[in-house]
Amino acid sequence: MKRKCMYCAHPISGRSDKKFCGDSCRNSYNNDKNRDRNLLVKKFHQRLQKNHRILNSFLQDETDKKVFKIALVEAGFNLQSVTSYTSDPQGVAYFFVYEIGFRILDEHIMHLTRSKNKGFEVTGLTG
Ligand SMILES: [Zn+2]
């Protein structure tokens, strides 16, 4: 079977490990691959930024606040886009979007908290 360039599908000859017909096809192929990867990272980043913006707007200047989960969701908050996860000494799970943490108190209420240490290490959280 005749081998084809991975970028332009042109038949290629020469060394059996050759994947592209030339440098320009190899470069184009790699550029496309990087572009896809960058777009994916950008998408995740935008989602995190949006989540952070929403949490920040609910929390405002406070460090602790209880909010309705539905209000966050309606504002566009995505519960799965978080940057870290931890649990307090009692085993209560906290999810973080950068320095703002949240935990689910019950099916309707969420507790938001702003970490002084930016979410990297969370100690002394209380109800
Ligand atoms: Zn080619």
Image (cartoon, rainbow, N blue to C red):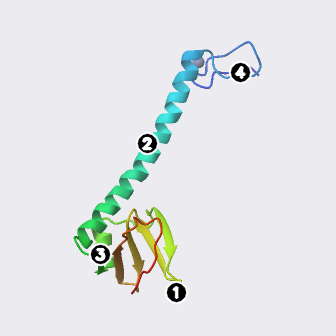
Q: Is residue 98 above or below residue 112?
A: above
The residue carrying pointer 2 sits among few (fewer than 14), some (14 to 19) or many (20 or more) residues within 10 Å by Cα, namely few
Q: Which mark is residue 3?
A: 4
- 83 left or right of 108? right
Above or below: residue 66 compared with residue 80 = below
Q: Which residue lies furthest to the top in this view?
A: 14
Give how far apart the Cα atoms at labels 4 and 2 are.
Answer: 30 Å
Nearer to us of marks 4 and 2 is 2
The crowd level at tag 4 (other Cα within 10 Å; few <14, some 14-19, many 20+) is some
Which mark is on residue 90? 1
Rendering quarter of residue 26: top right
Note whether 72 is above or below 41 in the view shown: below
In front of the other: 2 or 85:
85
Asked which quadrant contains residue 50, the reply is bottom left
* Residue 124 placement (x, y as % from top left): 44, 80
The picture places residue 92, in percent across and down from the top left corner, at 49, 82
Disc assigned to residue 63? 3
CA gap, disc 3 and disc 1: 20 Å
In this rendering, which labeled residue sits more in front, label 4 or label 1?
1
Q: Which of marks 3 and 4 is in front?
A: 3
Q: Which of 62 and 20 is in front in this view?
A: 62
Image quadrant containing the N terminus: top right
Mark number, residue 39 = 2
- Apparent side of residue 16 relative to residue 67 in the rendered image (left or right): right
Name the amino acid, label 1.
Gln
Q: Are marks 4 and 2 in contact (CB under 8 Å)?
A: no
The span from disc 1 to disc 2 (Cα, nearest Å) is 39 Å
Alpha carbon separation for disc pair 2 and 3:
33 Å
Q: Where is residue 16 in the image (x, y as percent from the top left)?
A: 77, 19
Q: What residue type is labelled 4?
A: Arg
The span from disc 3 to disc 4 (Cα, nearest Å) is 62 Å
